[in-house]
Amino acid sequence: MFSELKFPVPWGHVAAKAWGPLEGHPVLCLHGWLDNANTFDKLIPLLPRECYYVAMDFSGHGLSSHRPAGSHYHLLDYVSDVRRVAAALQWRRFTLMGHSMGGTVAGMFSFLYPEMVDKLILLENLGFLLAPEDTEAWLKSKRMVIDRLLSLEAKQQTPKARSPEAALQRLLEANRHLTAEGGAILLQRGATETPAGLVYNRDMRVRTDRESLTVEQCVKLLQKIQDRALIIVAQDGLLVPHKLDNRNRFVKALREAFESTLKEHIQLVEVPGSHFVHLNEPEVVSGIISNFLTAQNTRARL
């Protein structure tokens, strides 16, 4: 059983759902890009019952309010969502678990507020997005962000209504890693029923910007993690770690960091499955996550 939560923010509210006892160890769960809190529906019931899990909807996703007109959705805006929810819950120190984009937000929050995070769990994410190394490519990506936002504002289209079947089919077409069951779970929170059909809840502006960092910045930020981190990557996911070495130098730099000072407190696990393994086949990762949650931290605080 879960309960619905709603936290007031200046532009409306941030929605969330919670499982477990209020007095349990706090775990804040962060969903991926264009997803919502339901992404954890099948995983959390398999995790330790003594924890209190809160899965939030980022602004512009799920049941949370959209940001004001003219606004972007930057990475730091999502980090601010986390900080606001933690303050509302009066959590001073807690575990962060993030999937995909939620992992990037969790990583950045851990780097900015290391004293607030006791453990970090990243599902199909390495804690950040890699920026284009070529300056012209970087400039092009930033110009595209502005152009997309202005284009969306100029169109001001009414959200398209679809039948439940069509809404699910569109979602599955856009994400080959989702099963029909997983897609239906996300739609329960990701769409609203209207007389004309289902309308997606997401704010289309969330598609305009995804901030990223250089290789050097990523490795330096990893070294700021004060407590234990668990990184789970899927063999058929978006990272496909065994194929990345020939694609960019980031994985080489990351592994070198693991082999030096980082290996003592960062655990990297590869599991069978796709990008949504935690939703499609939660039993594949639930044991690994449960062991990590219940293990005592042995590393001294920095």
Image (cartoon, rainbow, N blue to C red):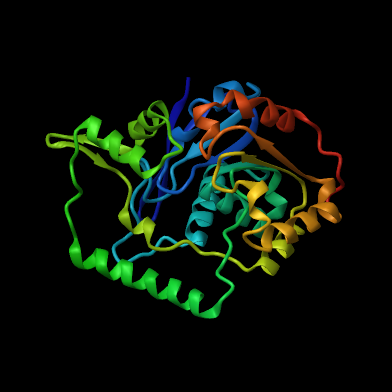
Examine the rendering and report whether any part of residue 175 can be seen: yes
73 to the left or right of 262: left
Tell me the quarter of the picture where residue 288 sits. Answer: top right
| Residue 7, image x, y percentages | 43, 43
The residue depicted at 59 percent of the width and 29 percent of the height is 52
Rendered position, 58 above or below 253: above
The residue depicted at 39 percent of the width and 75 percent of the height is 143
Examine the rendering and report whether any part of residue 16 can be seen: no
Rendered position, 151 above or below 298: below
| Residue 173, image x, y percentages | 34, 41
Which residue occupies the foreground of this view, 72 or 240? 240
Tell me the quarter of the picture where residue 261 sits. Answer: bottom right
| Residue 228, image x, y percentages | 76, 44
Tell me the quarter of the picture where residue 235 sits. Answer: top right
Rendered position, 125 above or below 277: below
Q: How many numbered marks, from 0 up?
A: 0
The residue depicted at 50 percent of the width and 74 percent of the height is 138
The residue depicted at 56 percent of the width and 39 percent of the height is 236
| Residue 64, image x, y percentages | 37, 45
